Image: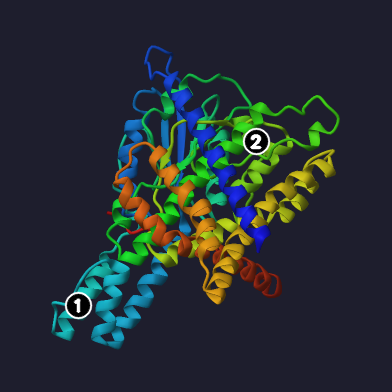
Amino acid sequence: MKIIIYLFIFLSAYWIVRILISFFWIKKLKKNFHSSKQNTARSFILVIPVLNEKDVILATIDYFLVLIKPFPGSKLLIVTTEKENKIYEQKKKSARELINRGIRDEIISLIKSDFAKDLSYLLDIGLLKNKAMEIINGDKNTIDVLNGVHKNDVIIIHYPFTFGKMAHQLNFCLKLLINKGVWTNEILGIYNADSRPEQETLFWLNKKGVGSGLIFQQYGNYFGNIYSIMKEGFFRKATLLSSSIWQNRWSVGFEIFNNLKQFIFPYRNIMGGKFLYPLNYCIGHGLFFTKDIFERQNFSEDTHNEDAIFGLRLSYEEKKILPLPFFDFSDSPNSIRSLFFQKSSWFLGPFQAPLYYKKLKAKITGVNKLKLFLLSGKLFFHAIFWLIGPSCLLLLFLNALINLDFKLFLLCYFCFLVLPGFLTYILFPNKKIKAMEVLFFLVIGSFSAYIIHGASAYYSIFLTIRSIFTKKEIDKYKTKILRN
């Protein structure tokens, strides 16, 4: 137990140092940055793949049109998928079958949960059925909503197949842009439908160099829907808020910090340096790159997540990913169920590192197997740490419970979870909730959030084992966000 306690205390100090380094870097770059429009404005292509985003897509389009307006020739592309039509038809078919059975409470519950309409005021079963059918038949999906969009600088591209995932949508769209000569020298950026990048984002990129071989990564600020989270019940609120703060802590203390290591890497010109190169870490939203980068490596369609293997190959090729000092405001799950399944999907990113090694080894001409193996191992160890951390903290808690002595557990708990999380919150810009209120909920909810974090990893391992025996691909969970 002493080893676990010392490890948590050491990691606490290490996390705090990493968080501070990242924030000092952000502060320095923002201080030196001025969003002057005197520079020659370059054009950008922003791509947003969508699935089941009807509630937010119009607001997303309006936001991004404002973002690209200062940059003439820039384009916003929304990539839909035929899978959504298939999903909606199945959803409507099942709903109609339930209505035909005529059970009042089931009809009211279905319409409320799946179509966001409350029909409990209708007492007559006949009127209830008619109104329910009317709602179902008139319900629109994202594709239907976009059919009414006729705005300049917005291009809607439809992926015409019912199979595949986001990687298929992206590859289909980007290849089409290249084949039609739409994407030439522009920097292309990928965002999610819930992304809200800071307004300085494109101005900052506009000041960067032009040419080929450019990659930029903007990291997430997961407080986009924090008001919605604060409307939840006490325990859910504490857990979900703690989880969103953990995700922001990960953005600055892990993702940005590891990115910055590329620029202070001292081993390049000494023996063994090429094997010790830092692992770049990519995330799927806020990712910018030039056309030649995509032509060298399309997004992986046969791995669960497309961003982890993308970053692994960039690491192998020692391509520097330039981090942005501005954030992409994104939503965090505001239900325990969504949080659990989102984490289980994310865990497969590092957990599938051995699969990435196998695929890249076969794909890269003249591959250095040792170098690729070491980088893949670094990525895989992220999955190992994901498992070990919550497991060790749970073990400490159970030991404290058995011995009725919680002092050392609470020491580790506060040092490793509460303190770095609170530091992250107070250092982040645009805080919306009072610091002392956040600290209170961090104390209450960090343990449950961290245990869910670990449990989701074990669930992913179960899904992987089941997939091996059933030969069936693991479905990619679509995180459901209840927005304000």
With 403 as the anchor, is 94 left or right in this view? left
Residues at marks 1 and 2, CA–CA distance in whole angstroms: 53 Å
Question: Compared to 484, does 271 lie above or below?
Answer: above
Identity of the residue furthest to the top in this view = 38
| x 44%, y 63%: residue | 338
Nearer-the-camera pick, 103 or 352: 352
| x 53%, y 52%: residue | 416
| Residue 140 - label | none
Question: Compared to 118, does 378 lie above or below?
Answer: above
Look at the numbered discs 1 and 2 and tell me whether their residues touch, using CB distance below 8 Å. Answer: no
- Which amino acid type is shown beneath numbered disc 1? Asn
Task: Name which quarter of the figure residue 27 lies in.
Answer: top left
Q: Name the residue under label 1.
A: 130
| x 35%, y 55%: residue | 440
Q: What element carries label 1?
A: helix
| Residue 295 - label | 2
Is residue 52 at least partly visible in the picture?
Answer: no
Percent x, y of residue 238: 37, 60
Nearer-the-camera pick, 15 or 302: 15
Task: Name which quarter of the figure residue 181 lies in.
Answer: top right
The mark that comes first in sequence, 1 or 2, is: 1
Q: How crowded is mark 1: few (under 14 residues within 10 Å), some or many (20 or more)?
A: few
- Which amino acid type is shown beneath numbered disc 2? Glu
Nearer-the-camera pick, 215 or 389: 389
Nearer-the-camera pick, 353 or 289: 353
Labels 1, 2: front one: 2
Is residue 255 at least partly visible in the picture?
Answer: yes
Total number of numbered discs in the rendering: 2
